[in-house]
Amino acid sequence: MNHATHHSDRPVLLAGGGDHSPELLQSLLPQCETRIAADGGAAALLRAGVMPDAVIGDLDSLSESTRVQIPAARIHHISEQDSTDFDKCLRHISAPLIYGTGFLGPRVDHQLASLTVLARRADRRCILADASDAVALVPPRLELDLDPGSRVSLYPMGAVRGESEGLRWPLAGLDFAPHLRAGTSNEASAARVSLRFDAPLMLIILPVAELPALARGLLSAPDAWPAPE
């Protein structure tokens, strides 16, 4: 079910409470007129000189010194504890693309939780990025213009099968699952990489230098996974 309350027809920047690359954050700000914080991620936006358009979460990580700088009407408290702040944000944001920073570290458990949310909210087109990587859930079909030789890692969040063109090691005929087979450290063998999957369960991990190519591919992908029930 779609519970979105923040709508934008342009990409949205979502700041989490983890580690941020200042250079990455500054590069994304001009591309995103709407800037939203997941709980304590508001501090990162304020440090960058940006007033959050909204702060969403259970607010257990939002310090009082940060909170007093933000208009009360922009703070949205969601008290339930059955989901992460990242999950709360994704289900309340509707946009063609969401760029998320501050979700891939420093704690491994937080990072794994964020990757799980990407699969749970498969209908949301979202890229999580840090200083080294850009991660997204692959839609049913994805076309990417990459530099030949670029790392293309694929990691399954469940049982999934796919096909590919333009990868050094093709995917056809392979069964992927976390306990069975992953597709990490593959690489682009051509300038155009095409991917198709039968379930919303495959993550793609690219070098952050390929973030613009990943964004273009997601924005132009013809199909989308359905929203969860």
Image: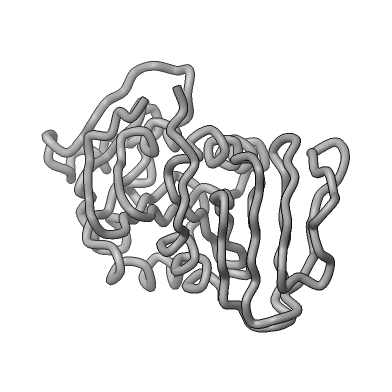
Q: Position of residue 1 (x, y in %)?
A: 37, 25
Picture coordinates of residue 123 (x, y %)? 45, 40
The image shows residue 102 at horizontal and vertical percentages of: 48, 51
Residue furthest to the right: 180
Quadrant of the rendered structure where residue 146 is? Answer: bottom right
Which residue is at 16% across, 39% downward? 74
**Occupied quadrant, residue 204:** bottom right
User: What count of labels does the image hold?
Assistant: 0
Describe residue 173's horizontal placement relative to residue 204 as left or right. Answer: right
Name the residue nearer the viewer: 4 or 13. Answer: 4
Nearest to the observer: residue 47 or residue 222: 222
For the point 38% across and 31% down, the residue is 88
Instruction: Examine the rendered structure and indicate whether residue 99 appears above or below residue 192.
Output: above
What colour scheme does the image use? one colour
In the image, what residue occupies the spot 22% across and 51% down?
8
Q: Quadrant of residue 90?
A: top left
In the image, residue 218 lies at what x, y percent? 47, 60
Front position in the image: 58 or 177: 177
The quarter in which the C terminus is drawn is top left
Is 33 situated left or right of 154 in this image? left
Residue at image point 42% right, 44% down: 124
| 200 is higher (above) or lower (below) than 142 | above
